[in-house]
Image (cartoon, rainbow, N blue to C red):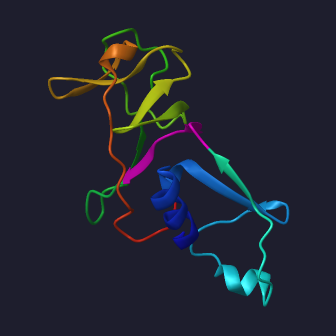
């Protein structure tokens, strides 16, 4: 992650928009320190891949207290029409995450060309020019990406 942050500062690419490939695998943050992987070598032959899009889905669990069952929820655009509210079905409906200068936006793969948008207090399916720009923040529990 520190290497990605250094590249981010010098190249201007967001750290979450890059993957480092080394020795046939993608290096993951917080899995091992780079010097532990490469030893005393002064040269690292790694490939930097710049990502502009990736497929994601949204999952969550709501805990309602003692004796009440947990509720599994997600975000889904399946069966939703333009300007209609997205559902909380946990069906792993995929979205394409687009990196933009201001943050990220999410295109529905169930309804290509339509994006997560906000209308009043609802998350709806909107046209590209209505796409909401989201800002990603680190996980509250400190888990890696």
Query: Residue 87, how many percent across, how many down?
Result: 37, 27
Residue 54 falls in image quadrant: top right
Question: Is 42 located above or below residue 142 in the figure?
Answer: below
Q: Quick check: 111 left or right of 49?
A: left
60 inside magenta stretch: yes
Q: Quick check: 68 left or right of 56?
A: left
Q: Residue at x 30, y 17 (%)?
A: 130
Residue 73 falls in image quadrant: top left
Query: Residue 134, how many percent across, how many down?
Result: 33, 39
Identify the image quadrant of the N terminus: bottom right
112 inside magenta stretch: no
In the picture as drawn, the residue positioned furthest to the right comes out as 24
Q: Quick check: 69 left or right of 76?
A: left
What main secondary structure does the magenta stretch of the protein show?
strand
Q: Nearer the viewer, residue 40 or 136?
A: 40
Query: Residue 63, how many percent across, how many down?
Result: 32, 58
Question: Is 33 located above or below residue 134 in the figure?
Answer: below
Q: Nearer the viewer, residue 92 or 12?
A: 12
Query: Residue 93, how many percent across, how many down?
Result: 54, 30
Q: Residue at x 46, y 42 (%)?
A: 58
In the picture as drawn, the residue positioned furthest to the bottom comes out as 40
Q: Residue at x 39, y 15 (%)?
A: 128
- Magenta span: 51-61
């Amino acid at each position: 992650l520190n290497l990605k942050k250094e590249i981010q500062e010098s190249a201007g690419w967001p750290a979450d928009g890059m993957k480092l490939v080394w020795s046939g695998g993608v290096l993951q943050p917080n899995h091992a320190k780079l010097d532990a992987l490469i030893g005393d070598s002064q040269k690292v032959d790694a490939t930097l891949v710049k990502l502009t899009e990736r497929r994601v889905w949204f999952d969550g669990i709501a805990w309602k207290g003692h004796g009440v069952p947990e509720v599994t929820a997600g975000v889904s655009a399946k069966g939703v029409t333009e300007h209609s509210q997205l559902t909380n079905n946990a069906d792993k409906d995929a979205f394409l995450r687009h990196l933009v200068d201001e943050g990220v936006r999410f295109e529905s793969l169930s309804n290509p060309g339509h994006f997560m948008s906000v209308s009043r207090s609802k998350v709806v399916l909107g046209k590209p020019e209505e796409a909401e720009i989201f800002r990603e923040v680190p996980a509250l529990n400190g888990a890696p990406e």
